[in-house]
Image (tube, rainbow, N blue to C red):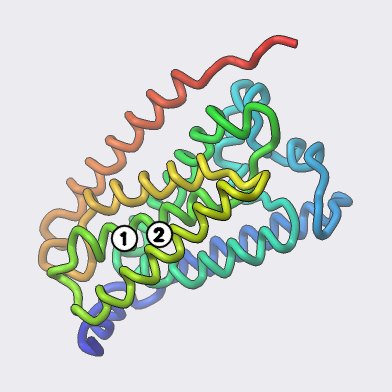
C-alpha cells in the first residue's frame, strides 16, 4: 500500500485545492462576522443578503446556486463541514487530480443547491458546503465500489466501512434533525459518484494519460445537461 500512496503523491504532488476551498469558506465566514452576523446563529436575512439559496431569490439570481455553498449557518456548521472536507478532500484530490477534483466539488455543490429548491429552499434559506462535500464522498465511493480492482484491498476494505458509516449517520441525522438539507446531501452524493465514475482516475495512471480529456468533457457535459433539466423544472414560488 505504501507504493500505491507514493504513486498518488507523484501523480498529484500538491493537493492545493482542498486547503484553498477551506480558506475561502473561512474567509466568507469572517466576512459574515464583519457584517454583524452572530457567531453561532447568523440571521437568515443576512445569509440571504450574502447569497443564500432561497427559491424566489435564486430564480431571480441563479448565481446563488454557487454563492450559497460558501456560506455557513454558524461556527458549528462551518467546523463540521471543513473537518469533513479536510478529511476526505485530500485523498479525493489525489485520486482525481486538482482540476477534476475542483470540478467535482463545484458541480456537486450546484447540483445540491438545485435539489434544495424542490424542498427546503422553497421556504427557508439554504446554505453550506455539505452538498459539495457529499459530492467528494460520492467520488471516493465511486473509487472504492466501482474501481476497487485498481486499489489496494486493505484500503478498499477500510474505506468502504468508513464511507458507508459517514453516509448512513449523516443521512439519519438529516432526516431526524430540523434544518438539515438532506436534498442537497443526496443530490451532491449522487452527482459526485456519477461524475467520478465517468472521469479518469489518477490511481490508474496509464488510463488517466490516455483518456482524461474526453472523459472529463463527457462528465462535464452530462452534469450540465442534468443540472439544466433540473433547473428548468424547478417549481415556481407559490403566490402569497
Q: Is residue 78 above or below residue 162?
A: above
Badge 1 marks a residue whose secondary structure is helix
How many tags in the picture? Answer: 2
Residue at the farthest right position: 36
User: Relative to 112, is 29 on the left or the right?
Assistant: right
Residue at the spot x=85%, y=50% of the render? 35
Q: Position of residue 187 (x, y in %)?
A: 43, 42
Q: Is residue 101 above or below residue 186?
A: below
Residue at the spot x=39%, y=71% of the render? 162
Q: What mark, if any, has residue 137 been given in the picture?
A: 2
**Contact between labelled residues 2 and 1, with CB atoms less than 8 Å apart:** yes
Q: CA distance from mark 1 to mark 2?
A: 6 Å
Residue at the spot x=44%, y=68% of the render? 88
Badge 2 marks a residue whose secondary structure is helix
Label 2: few (<14), some or many (≥20) within 10 Å? many
Residue toward you, 147 or 60:
147
Q: Position of residue 104 (x, y in %)?
A: 38, 51
Q: Position of residue 65 (x, y in %)?
A: 56, 36
Residue at the spot x=23%, y=86% of the render? 1
Kindly identify which residue carries mark 1: 141
Q: Quadrant of residue 39?
A: bottom right
Amino acid at each position: 500500500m505504501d507504493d500505491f500512496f507514493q504513486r498518488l503523491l507523484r501523480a498529484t504532488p500538491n493537493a492545493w485545492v482542498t486547503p484553498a476551498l477551506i480558506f475561502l469558506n473561512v474567509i466568507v465566514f469572517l466576512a459574515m462576522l464583519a457584517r454583524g452576523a452572530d457567531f453561532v446563529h447568523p440571521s437568515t436575512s443576512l445569509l440571504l443578503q450574502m447569497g443564500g439559496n432561497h427559491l424566489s431569490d435564486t430564480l431571480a439570481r441563479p448565481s446563488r446556486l454557487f454563492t450559497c455553498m460558501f456560506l455557513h449557518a454558524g461556527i458549528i456548521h462551518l467546523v463540521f463541514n471543513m473537518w469533513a472536507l479536510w478529511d476526505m478532500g485530500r485523498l479525493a484530490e489525489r485520486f482525481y487530480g486538482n482540476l477534476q477534483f475542483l470540478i467535482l466539488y463545484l458541480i456537486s455543490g450546484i447540483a445540491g443547491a438545485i435539489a434544495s429548491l424542490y424542498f427546503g429552499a422553497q421556504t427557508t434559506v439554504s446554505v453550506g458546503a455539505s452538498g459539495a462535500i457529499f459530492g467528494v464522498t460520492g467520488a471516493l465511493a465511486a473509487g472504492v465500489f466501482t474501481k476497487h480492482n485498481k486499489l489496494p484491498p486493505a484500503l478498499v476494505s477500510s474505506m468502504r466501512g468508513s464511507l458507508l458509516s459517514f453516509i448512513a449517520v449523516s443521512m439519519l441525522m438529516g432526516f431526524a434533525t430540523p434544518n438539515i438539507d438532506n436534498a442537497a446531501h443526496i443530490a451532491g452524493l449522487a452527482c459526485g459518484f456519477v461524475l467520478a465514475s465517468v472521469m479518469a482516475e489518477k490511481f490508474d495512471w496509464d488510463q488517466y494519460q490516455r483518456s482524461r480529456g474526453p472523459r472529463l468533457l463527457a462528465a462535464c457535459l452530462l452534469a450540465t445537461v442534468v443540472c439544466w433539466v433540473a433547473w428548468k423544472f424547478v417549481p415556481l414560488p407559490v403566490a402569497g
